[in-house]
Structure formats: structure tokens, C-alpha cells
Image: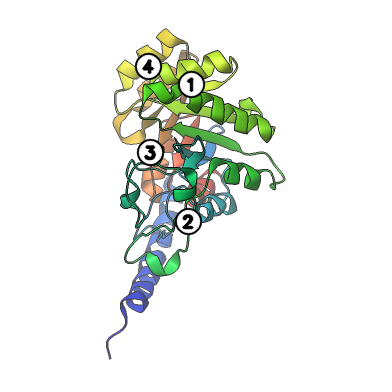
Amino acid sequence: MLLKPVVLWVVLMGAIGGSGYLGFRSHRSASSRPHPHVLVIGHAGSGFLSPVSPFNPLPPNSMGSIKKAFEDGADGVEVDVQLSKDNTPILYHDVLLDSFTDAAGLIDTLPAARVLGLPYRAGFPYEPFQHETIISLEQLLKYLGTRQELSYLQLDLRNRLPEHHPAYVQTVLRLLAKYNYPLPKVAFISPDVALLEQFRTAAPTAVLLLDAEGDFEGTRQKVLQHRFQGFVIASKVVQRAQVQQAKQQGLQVILFGGRSASAIAGILDKGPDAIEVNNVRRLRKLLE
């Protein structure tokens, strides 16, 4: 008798999970480089959808994904923030709603009521294992307020239109103030220098991180020129020597990526200040 697709997938995940655990133990015991304190930041919560290593059916920026990151030992989370037409900060990664929902359009052209609560659609094999909906930044802040220890919060600022920058800045800062979220616990991230400068004008003590978008040297020069605190860059495009050079100049370096034990160990060996990781539990184990 043929197994149903979902049952077959569960069996496959069990087999892969077992072999992955053995590989993790082996790599961990072989690693000898000492690691200074590194902040463990859940990448869009507990990472992006993945069929293996490990299986992750939770959509990025969803409440379930964020809660799982903390359950697995994250010091904080990175989330993507877009502003609705009526100025509500909404957590969603992609430009178009139809990438993860049955709706269509851009968030900044729609009222919040049309976006919040939309069910995520992840497709096979994830759909039977998730029932998440789109949430707002305010919902996240309410949840974080229930935790015993205040978490680090990295806000990836996704605002397409420069003319919307002032409203975006004012709305996000007003919401953080409403929930008494201390700015030293928050990092504002964007590839847009002008947007980061507007955050600095409105909140001079804000931690501002430039999104490198793959260009290490160009980003490092911009960060120094504009006196930002640091930058975020994909781990695969930067070398340990570059990370250490930036840190010697007093810059924070946040790397993102990594799901397997070997990939995460490789990121750790570059010596970043924080890692936006796709597998919080595995990173936490490597740091123990």
C-alpha cells in the first residue's frame, strides 16, 4: 500500500534527522577554535522554509517562527518591517503578497486590515505543519513584553519609496516608545543610507547597520563615512580577515546564513559579533 505524501515526508524527515544529528556531533567534537560571545539572532524568526537540515515549515516573520527561535535559545530575532498604506508596521519579507499568501499586491498600497491575519501559504511539504498568519510589529512587541528577559530586536527596514521615509521612521519609533522598548536593544538595518540617516535624526542614539548586499569593501567605506555602527552581510561573501579588519575599526559585523552544523561552524570561525542564523538550536549547541 502506498503511503500518503505527508506520511512519506515524515518518514523521510526522520531518516534525514537521524543522520544529520550524527554529523552534527562529529563536527562539533572536531572544532577547536574558541569563540568569544556571539549574539544568536533568529533569522526572520527561526529561519526560512526548509525541507531538510532541519525540516522547517514555519514561514519567515510569523509568530510561530519567532516563538520557536526563542524556544531554541535565541538572544533575539531579526524581522522584516513594511509599512501599510495606513501606516501600520507589518512583518513580511517579500515585496509581493502572492509569494506567501493567496492575496496579491504590495503591502504599502493596501490598508492594514487587508493584510494582517492573511494566512500564509507555504505549499508542499510545509502546509500540513503550519497555520500561521501575517502579524504586525505591534503584535511582536506585545509578545516580547511577556518574556522575562528583554530580547535583542533587529529591524530590517523595508520601505520602497523615499517619500514614505518620514512616516516610516516616525511610526516605527513611536511604536517602540509605546512599548518602552530600549533603543540599545534595537538595531535598524537597511541598504538605504538616507533612511538610516533619518532614523539617526529622529533618534540620535539608534544603532544603525548598513545592509551590505554582498559588497564588503564598499559597505565598509560607507559605514565609516556615515558613522554607522556596523553592517550586515551574507557570511558566504566575506572572509575572516575582512571581519576582523572591520572589528578593529570599531565596527559591528553581523553575518547571516547557516543551517547545517558545518556551515554554522564556518560562520563562527569568522568571528562576527552576531549571527542571523537559520538554525538557532544548532548554533546554540556549538556555543555551549
The single residue placed furthest to the bottom in the displayed view is 1
Quote the CA–CA distance across marks 2 and 4: 37 Å
- Image height of 44 relative to 251, above or below: below
Q: Earlier in the sequence, mark 3 or mark 2?
A: 3
Q: Earlier in the sequence, mark 1 or mark 2?
A: 2
Find disc 3 in the rendering and name its residue: 109
Q: Does the rendering let one see residue 105? A: yes
Estimate the spatial distance between the alpha carbons at disc 1 and disc 4, rounded to whole Å. 26 Å
Q: Nearer the viewer, mark 3 or mark 1?
A: 3
Mark 2 vs 4: CB contact within 8 A: no
Where is mark 1, residue-wise?
166
Dot 1 crowding, Cα within 10 Å, few <14, some 14–19, many 20+? few
**Residue at the image point whose x is 38% and y is 22% from the top:** 162
Residue under label 4, please give it: 220
Secondary structure of the residue carrying numbered label 2: loop
At 47% from the left edge and 47% from the top edge, which residue is drawn?
61
Label 4 sits on what residue type? Arg
Tag 3 near tag 2, CB within 8 Å: no
Marks 4 & 3, CB-CB < 8 Å contact: no
Residue 276 pos. (x, y %): 45, 39
Report crowding for label 4: few under 14, some 14 to 19, many 20 or more residues within 10 A (C-alpha).
many
Please tell me whether mark 3 or mark 2 is closer to you in this view. Answer: 3
In the rendering, at what x and y percent does residue 19 appear?
37, 64
